[in-house]
Image: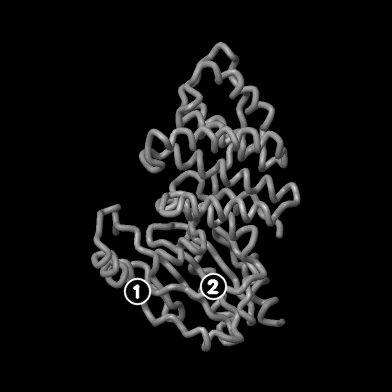
Amino acid sequence: MAVSKLAVFAGMAGLAFSVACGPAPAGGGEEAPSASGTLDVSELIGRMRDMAWAEEVDAAQALIKAQRSRHDTSSPGWLLAASWLGRGAGFAGRWDVAERYAGEARDGSVALLGQRDLDADRELPLALGAGIEVLGRARDARGDRAGAVEFLTAARGQYRGTSIEMRIQKNVLLLSLEGQPFPVLDVEEHLGTPLPSAESLKGKVVVAFFWAHWCSDCKRQLPVLEQLHETYGDQGLAILGPTQLYGYVQRGEDATPEQELAYLRGAYQERFPIPSWMSVPVSQQNFLDFGVSTTPTLVVIDRGGIVQLYNPGDLPYEELAPHVERLLAA
């Protein structure tokens, strides 16, 4: 299974429970400053991020080498900068460089965990999550997919209950979910019609659309699903829309689970109606199990209940419809 840069690294700008949806930032590279100039760590992170997306690995290595003696290399900010170099080298397929800097980010982050909680600040979980992610990808790139899945699964267990658990699980599933039976969805609550039974879904092609009420990309994905339903709904297509509660409502106002559910069933639906043809189970467990650190995440399941596509991120109709049509024709 080919794994795109965007699919693997989408959502890296935020934590697992508050990831900004939408495409990962693209950026052109910049020339590294001379060794005589000291960058603020936030500027260093920004430059390393831009160079990563531009795959400017040599320039990024030169920059981080020039800055190394001028920074506290045990700080979360430095480790996050190093993790971006690891990501960029992975984008470029330079796995020796990727492993070196991902390893620095991972090992440095683990060392800091003896002094602080992982989620005590924003930069540390980003650095650790990226380090683990790239190290797993490097194993897969070297032909050891089983070892990569084992490594990432162990990491998920080690960091279960933290903000990076979903992110790690996403990478496990990118390497292992396609070709496997679709797991049963958990239902704590639901919006709209109840979740169809497993029996009633047998023989149907299913698109599972994992979304969040705050996610603009999810709102843009919904018309694509509407078009799929109109075209293929009477040919055996079912669309499910799992979501979870986030602890807030409009304008980021804190909310209890009861208040957030009332918002989703009331004010939210008045602005963004949930279609009658899409059942919406509400459960945090689904998002953990399916590694939904990126919203939307789309999963396409064939008539036999086997996952044929696992895609963190949105997809246009022109890309999603052929998957559905092929499975309906099978």
Is residue 99 placed above or below 36 in the rendered structure?
A: below
Left of 204 or right of it: where is 14? left
Q: Closest to the observer: 164 or 151?
A: 151
Q: Is residue 20 visible?
A: no
| Residue 275 screen position, x and y as percent | 42, 76
| Residue 106 screen position, x and y as percent | 54, 38
Is residue 220 placed above or below 229 in the rendered structure?
A: above
Q: Secondary structure at mark 2?
A: loop
Q: Secondary structure at mark 1?
A: strand
Residue at point 36%, 40% (across, down):
120
Report if the CB atoms under discs 2 and 1 are less than 8 Å apart: no
Earlier residue among tags 2 and 1: 2
Left of 38 or right of it: where is 215? left
| Three-letter code for the amino acid on which mark 2 is drawn | Pro
The answer for how far apart the CA atoms under marks 2 and 1 are is: 18 Å
Residue at point 39%, 64% (across, down):
244
| Residue 273 screen position, x and y as percent | 37, 72
Left of 287 or right of it: where is 143? right
The residue indicated by pointer 2 is: 183
The residue indicated by pointer 1 is: 189
Query: In the rendering, which numbered label is found on residue 108?
Result: none
Residue at point 27%, 66% (across, down):
263
| Three-letter code for the amino acid on which mark 1 is drawn | Glu
